[in-house]
Image: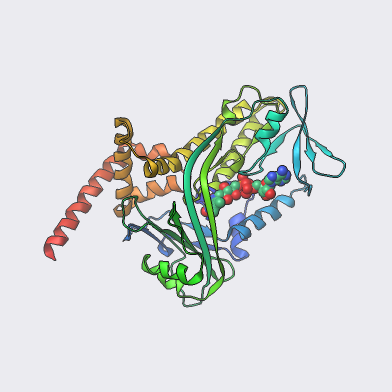
Amino acid sequence: MHALLPGGRSQIERWFPGFGREAVEQGALASEAHQSEQWIDDERAVSAPNVVLLNGSRTFMEGLLRRRTLALPNVRLVPDAATGLTYRDGRVSGVRLSTADDGVVPADFVVDAMGRSSRMAAWLERDGWQAPPLERMQIDVNYATAYFARSEDAPRVAVATSRVSPDYPKKTHAALTAVENGRWMLLQMTYGEDRPPQDQDGFRARCADLPPVFAEVARSEPIGEVHTFRLAEARRRRYDTLDRIPGGLVSVGDAVASFNPIYGQGMSSAALHASCLSEYLCATSDATGVATRFFELQKVVVDAAWDLSTQSDAQRLETGRPPLPVRVQRALVDQVLAAAVVDIPVATAFNEVAFMNAHPSTLAAPSVVLRSVVANVRARARAARSSRRT
Ligand SMILES: Cc1cc2nc3c(=O)[nH]c(=O)nc-3n(C[C@H](O)[C@H](O)[C@H](O)COP(=O)(O)OP(=O)(O)OC[C@H]3O[C@@H](n4cnc5c(N)ncnc54)[C@H](O)[C@@H]3O)c2cc1C
């Protein structure tokens, strides 16, 4: 399953105006806040007004993006694999291809967008440059995705998520989205050795233990097999730390950082990297120089996404007691997370960060933290009153 976050969508819309409208014309579903459900530890969260999403499968969105890109007059597709770089005077001068005659495409500027398994670091090292240091974070995440037929009398919900806290007895996270061609896409996600079922019966049985909308969708007619996927680690390549890198070379998207997919940040991060690249190229007088400024701009985006996802993973996997500053920071984050379930303004602020529209530091604003504490105190008081009544 892939979800395009609003932050990524607005960047794509910037590069390809009308992208969202075109997607809807071709079958994607635009959903409003009232069509979405968020569940945390089996408790229904308040509905924040900014849960406005564009829903479609990854293949569908990528196909549309690819067509728009290839329609640009100055874009040409070369259907060969890249195998290395050529250099002149300390900068890149071309890309080697896997053609029979080892062809080279001349280039003043090269963008490595080869994804998580990019060979760029190995090529640089082989050619006598510095390779970017690789940071890794163990995640051991398991994914299982299945499609179901969406009939006319299907639930009014278009998007649902169900998240569980580390100490909650149930361990399956889930997400559901209505996609093109009258289908539901339903995801189950777990960590470590607890893997989601790979067969339809087991998959549906586990849905029965999720909030009601998941069970309801899983009773529909299944389409195709359950697809499973396992990702052992998040990775980040630190191009921003290099002293010796050829001029005219940048790296974007998963080639630089690939995260725990549960946060849905990957495509939106890549879109934000494209915006950093635009800002860099518009401001620089010599794009063939070392792209230090680009890597600085990109670092702000990568740091935000990396910290958001790896902090939760680190917390889940840690064994000892963390230092005091970390415990204080987590206590504040916990306040905001708890308040996002019961308070619409806090949920809205939280979504802006989760959707990559706002920097995570906005959640540390005194107004947000204070509102969260008050909302949590009130929620606890309400819960105590209602338990006294029953
Ligand atoms: C299970 C799972 C679920 C995910 N869910 C989400 C989600 O919900 N939302 C989200 O935003 N992101 C999600 N992601 C992350 C998302 O898939 C990636 O962040 C995104 O695809 C990165 O785009 P990219 O263009 O950088 O890399 P990729 O999509 O990996 O594209 C790299 C391309 O480069 C090509 N390539 C590689 N080497 C060469 C070469 N030598 N020569 C020529 N071409 C080459 C590859 O064939 C590929 O087409 C998920 C990832 C996984 C694994």
Point out residue 72 in the picture as x, y percentages from the top left corner: 74, 49
Identify the residue at the far front of this view.
193
Residue 4 visible to the viewer: no
Residue 388 visible to the viewer: yes
Question: Image check: 143 left or right of 15?
Answer: left
- The answer to which of 180 and 122 lies nearer the viewer is 122
Question: Image check: 82 left or right of 218?
Answer: right
Question: Image check: 114 left or right of 309?
Answer: right
Residue sitting at x 12%, y 64%: 389
Question: Image check: 111 left or right of 209?
Answer: right
Point out residue 98 in the picture as x, y percentages from the top left corner: 80, 43
Point out residue 78 in the picture as x, y percentages from the top left corner: 79, 47
Residue sitting at x 59%, y 70%: 181
- The answer to which of 273 and 102 lies nearer the viewer is 102
Residue sitting at x 65%, y 26%: 130
- The answer to which of 271 and 315 lies nearer the viewer is 315
* The C terminus, quarter of image: bottom left
